[in-house]
Image: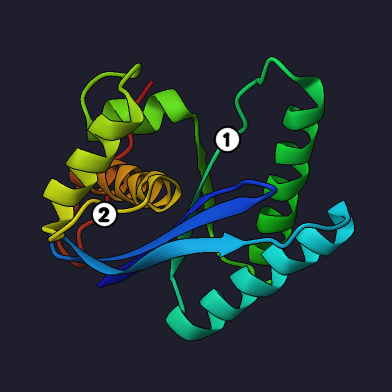
Amino acid sequence: MTRILGIDPGSRLTGFGIIEMQGPRAVWIGSGCIRTAEGTLDTRLKTICQGLAALLDEHQPDEVAVEQVFMHRNADSALKLGQARGAAISTVALRSLPLSEYSPTEIKKAIVGKGNAAKAQVQHMVQHLLGLNKLPQEDAADALAAALCHAHLRQSMQQLSPRLPAGVRRLRRRR
């Protein structure tokens, strides 16, 4: 079993979603948002770090998937989002956990089947894939989608890599 934490960074709301892979099946463990209070940027970033640290302590994920920053029309918003993302990545890096990054397009394509899917489509597919009885909140759904994207890619890579029985060596081709 592999436990995966997905993160959708934001300076006001940072979504999180935790799934556990039980064979080929993804099981919902928890999800929600870290909400930062109004205040200075350093205070909000501290809240993100502390919230993620508490989640890491409580849920002990094996791997982490984070959504990459996309370019906002407003440069100031993009900068704040990048700083929130940096705080999240730093918190994970301090735990030496494997971290994978995915663009919003990659995540949507993996979950919905098309890279330009609407947020409502992502929410609906996350609910369906995890068997949830209600739609997850937008930021939590995005974080769960990042975790599911990582899980699907991880499983695909495992299936593609040939497995050899114990004691069998791979032969090298002669040139």
Q: Nearer the viewer, residue 99 or 111?
A: 111
Q: Is residue 57 left or right of residue 4?
A: right
Residue at 85 percent across and 52 percent down: it is 41
Q: Which residue is mark 2?
A: 169
Q: Which residue is mark 1?
A: 68
Q: Is residue 152 left or right of residue 150?
A: left
From what the image shows, is residue 49 above or below residue 73? below
Q: On the rendered image, what quadrant is the C terminus found in?
A: top left
From what the image shows, is residue 73 above or below residue 6? above
The residue carrying pointer 1 sits among few (fewer than 14), some (14 to 19) or many (20 or more) residues within 10 Å by Cα, namely many
Q: Earlier in the sequence, mark 2 or mark 1?
A: 1
From what the image shows, is residue 158 above or below residue 131? above
Task: Residue 53 in the image: state x and y as whole percent.
Answer: 63, 75
Secondary structure category for the residue under label 2: loop
From what the image shows, is residue 107 above or below residue 133? above
Q: Amino acid at mark 1?
A: Gln
Q: On the rendered image, what quadrant is the N terminus found in?
A: bottom left
Label 2 – label 1 distance at C-alpha: 39 Å
Q: Is residue 95 left or right of residue 148?
A: right
Residue 71, by quadrant, is top right
Task: Residue 169 in the image: state x and y as whole percent.
Answer: 26, 54
- Observer-side mark, 2 or 1, equals 1
Task: Residue 138 in the image: state x and y as whole percent.
Answer: 39, 45
- In this view of the protein, can residue 17 be seen by the observer? yes
> In the displayed image of the protein, which residue is found farthest to the front?
38
Q: Amino acid at mark 2?
A: Arg
